[in-house]
Amino acid sequence: MKQQTIIIIGATSGIGKTLFEKYAADGNHIGIVGRRTHLLDELRQEHPDMTVTATADITKQDEIVRAIYATTVRCSPS
């Protein structure tokens, strides 16, 4: 399967975390967004070469827009 660039909002638990684990196992580049920085950092440590993080609260539109933009730019493979 071809590598993809994927952005996951709410990646620190539940469905978001499961999606992160699945896509990381497939070798994709992943941007993960969530409120809890320490949990984002823990996930990034599992797959540091393919994961970028951004902290944001999904209830705050300006934060989520900034986070999606930041992860998209930094997540693109070189």
Image (cartoon, rainbow, N blue to C red):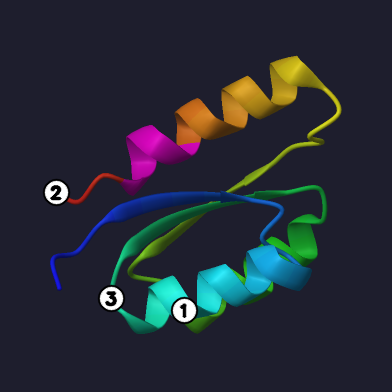
For the record, the magenta segment spans 71-75
Q: Which amino acid does the dot numbered 2 rest on?
A: Ser
Which residue position is annotated with label 2?
A: 78
Q: Nearer the viewer, mark 1 or mark 3?
A: 1
Q: Is residue 53 left or right of residue 3?
A: right
Q: Which amino acid does the dot numbered 1 rest on?
A: Lys
Specify the quadrant of the image occupied by residue 14. bottom right
Which residue position is annotated with label 3?
A: 27
- Find the distance from the CA under tag 1 to the CA under tag 3: 9 Å
Residue 49 tag number: none
Which residue position is annotated with label 1?
A: 22
Q: Which amino acid does the dot numbered 3 rest on?
A: Gly
Classify mark 3: residues with Cα within 10 Å, few (<14), some (14-19) or many (20+): some
Specify the quadrant of the image occupied by residue 11. bottom right
User: At 52% from the left edge and 82% from the top edge, which residue is drawn?
Assistant: 46
Question: Which one is earlier in the sequence, the residue at label 2 or at label 1?
Answer: 1
- Find the distance from the CA under tag 2 to the CA under tag 3: 15 Å
